Image (tube, rainbow, N blue to C red):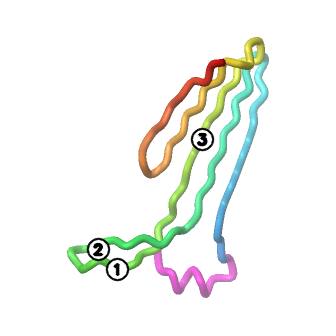
Amino acid sequence: FNEQDRIDSPLNLQDLSVRATHYLADWDLSVTYRGSPQRRVEALDGVSERPVLKWVGTFTAFLIWRPIPELRTRARYDEDGFDFDTERP
């Protein structure tokens, strides 16, 4: 997107973070999204490298089983791909 249009806009968003938790009978499901515009250097349409502004976001889901809270699972998706892990004591 156009950096000058963003700067001239009355809404200059530097960072966005949203978190929600859904409490189920035996489970807690938490989701988080965080994103921000970041300056990157890229080659566009065969043109030499130049700085561009890109939106970079990360989505994370965290699931906890209430009867055994030590059993936790986290899934994360960002520009590097999908990451999944299970935490155990």
Q: Amino acid at mark 1?
A: Arg
Q: Nearer the viewer, mark 1 or mark 2?
A: 1
Tell whether label 2 touches label 1 (CB within 8 Å).
yes
Q: Who comes first in sequence, dot 3 or dot 1?
A: 1
Mark 3 packing: few (<14 Cα in 10 Å), some, or many (20+)?
some
Q: Amino acid at mark 2?
A: Leu
Residue that lies at the very extreme toward the left in this rendered image: 46
Quarter of the figure with residue 62: top right
Percent from the top left, x then y, of residue 63? Answer: 66, 27
Q: CA distance from mark 3 to mark 2?
A: 30 Å
What residue does disc 3 label? 60
Q: What mark, if any, has residue 50 been given in the picture?
A: 1
Q: Please give the name of the residue rendered at 66% of the width and 45% of the height, measured from the top-left corner.
A: 32
Tell whether label 1 touches label 3 (CB within 8 Å).
no
Q: Amino acid at mark 3?
A: Thr
Percent from the top left, x then y, of residue 84? Answer: 51, 31
Question: 22 or 42: nearer the eye?
Answer: 42
What range is drawn magenta here? 1-11
Q: Is residue 3 magenta?
A: yes
